[in-house]
Amino acid sequence: MLALSSLFLVFVCVNGQTQNVDQVLSTLTNVADFYNLVKTTSTSSALQGTGPFTVFAPTGTAMHRNRKLAQLTNDTVAAGKFVQYHIVNGAYNTQDLVNELHLTSKSGILIRANHYNYRDRVTVQGSLVIESHPASNGIVHVISYYMDPPVGTLLQAVQSDPNLSTFAGLMVSANLSSVLSDDGPYTLLAPTNAAMTALTVGVLQRLQADPQIFRDTMMYHIIHGTIYAFGMHSGYLHNLGEKDRERIVNSAVFGVSIDNKRIVNLDINANNGVLHHMNGLLIPSTYRSHVLYGFPLAGTTTTASTRA
């Protein structure tokens, strides 16, 4: 890492870069709100040091979302943790931010980088890197949204969310707790309680009547790899069930849908992946007619009375 950092510093000096990271931040008007936090938390002087440092600086627009800036302005402790989470030791160009790379922030908390072939997009904690500025002691990446630390494992994320309690219980019943707690990485598509309540009693009965159907359906909600919103495009997804693949459609008008069910809350970070809320239960196509309408599975028979 030391050799790579030295090469990077030689590169920026050859290109005439004499400003340090702190000075670069101070010149970028689109990250002025973030830089004000840097100064008020006494991080500014540290970024003038030898480094190297990589800073992920949210835009002003990002800092005002969900009143984030207002919250941090009134809480210096939280502001300090926030700033430290957006700084990494070492100089990482966009080409260094390879898919599923784990970085450790100055706060000691994980940052996950992803590089998606789709439009050659690079993200950190799901936030898009929109421009990069080299410095004499590192690099500043401007990002589209402030980064949120992971909330634990995917199992902890889904169990701690009151809007996902029904689905969380089903995942535990399907003996998938250990899967959602391992290293992954996974993308978990979790139907909300409202989505589960909308299902008829017959659907839930048929889903849970056959252990194989039940487990396959639950695994159908777990996708290989970490797919944030900026990495989503129309195509097919590989899931842990491996029975069938989901069809994903990314529409500029209607948003992202998977098997005609919409994602209603995006990019909830976990240590081992990312969680998205869905407005409907996803069912593998092999079982769909049976689970939804009671039609017999291939090679089996059933009576009309079992349909609902």
Image: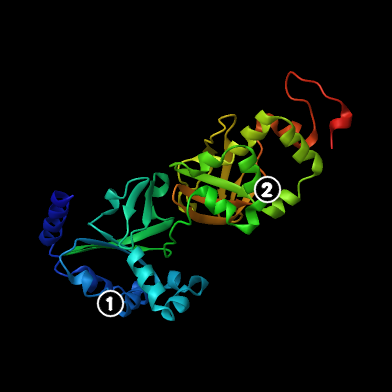
Residue shown at 22% from the left, 68% from the top: 21
The residue beneath circle 1 is 42
Task: For label 1, count other residues whose C-alpha is less than 10 Å away and answer few (under 14), some (14-19) or many (20+).
Answer: few
Instruction: Decide if residue 118 is in sight here.
Output: yes
Instruction: Decide if residue 235 is in sight here.
Output: no
The residue beneath circle 2 is 280
Residue 234 screen position, x and y as percent:
53, 43
Q: Within the image, what quadrant is residue 255 found in? A: bottom right
- Judge whether 2 appears above or below 25 on screen: above
Residue shown at 11% from the left, 56% from the top: 10
Residue 131 screen position, x and y as percent:
32, 61
Residue 219, numbered circle: none
Residue 91 screen position, x and y as percent:
22, 57
Please indicate whether residue 275 sits to the left or right of residue 50 in the image: right
Label 1 vs label 2: CA separation? 47 Å
Of 248 and 108, nearer the camera is 108
Please indicate whether residue 270 sits to the left or right of residue 123 in the image: right
Q: Within the image, what quadrant is residue 215 found in? A: top right
Q: How many labels, in total?
A: 2
Q: Amino acid at mark 2?
A: Gly
Nearer the viewer's eye, disc 1 or disc 2?
1
Asked which secondary structure carries label 1, the reply is loop
- The C terminus, quarter of image: top right
For the view shown, which residue lies furthest in the right direction?
Answer: 305
Residue 95 screen position, x and y as percent:
28, 49
Of 285 and 73, nearer the camera is 73
- Choose the circle earlier in sequence order: 1 or 2: 1
Q: Amino acid at mark 1?
A: Ser
